[in-house]
Image (tube, rainbow, N blue to C red):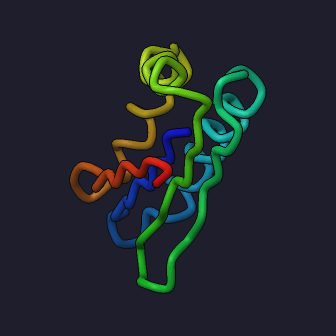
Amino acid sequence: MPVIVATIKVKSGQGADFEAAAKELEAAVNANEEGCSLYQLCKGDEADTYYFVEQYRDAAAVEAHRGSDHFKTLGRKMGAFMDGPPSILRLQEA
């Protein structure tokens, strides 16, 4: 089961706007993606830093997520508040 942790830095003062858009994406993924067993927005201790913790059934489910309309649309919406691209950590079961 692929696990992904996306670390996202948000522009100073833009946290509330980012969270609103990210929560929309979280809800859409959880409601529409059967291959995704976990998709959760988390906030770190570091200021303006957020994490998406994601777990998928398989690689095909990851690709389905990336190709979904809600990911493309809401990803662009979140991008307006981000301070650069996310850092992606991909994990596999040992």
Query: Where residue 38 sits: x, y (%)?
Result: 68, 44
> Can you tell which quarter of the image residue 5 is in?
bottom left
User: For this view, does 46 lie left or right of residue 84?
Assistant: right
Front residue of 91 and 21: 91
Front residue of 37 and 13: 37
Q: Quadrant of the N terminus?
A: top right
Front residue of 79 and 31: 31
Above or below residue 9? Residue 46 is below
Query: Where residue 7 sits: x, y (%)?
Result: 38, 60
Query: Where residue 79 sits: x, y (%)?
Result: 35, 42
**Residue at horizontal 50%, vertical 47%?**
3
**Residue at horizontal 57%, vertical 62%?**
16
Q: Residue furthest bottom?
A: 45
Above or below residue 37? Residue 11 is below
Q: Residue furthest front?
A: 94
User: For this view, does 64 lie left or right of residue 8?
Assistant: right
**Residue at horizontal 37%, vertical 63%?**
10
Query: Where residue 4 sits: x, y (%)?
Result: 45, 48
- Please tell me how many numbered marks the rendered image carries: 0
Front residue of 15 and 58: 58
**Residue at horizontal 35%, vertical 72%?**
12
Q: Residue furthest right?
A: 31
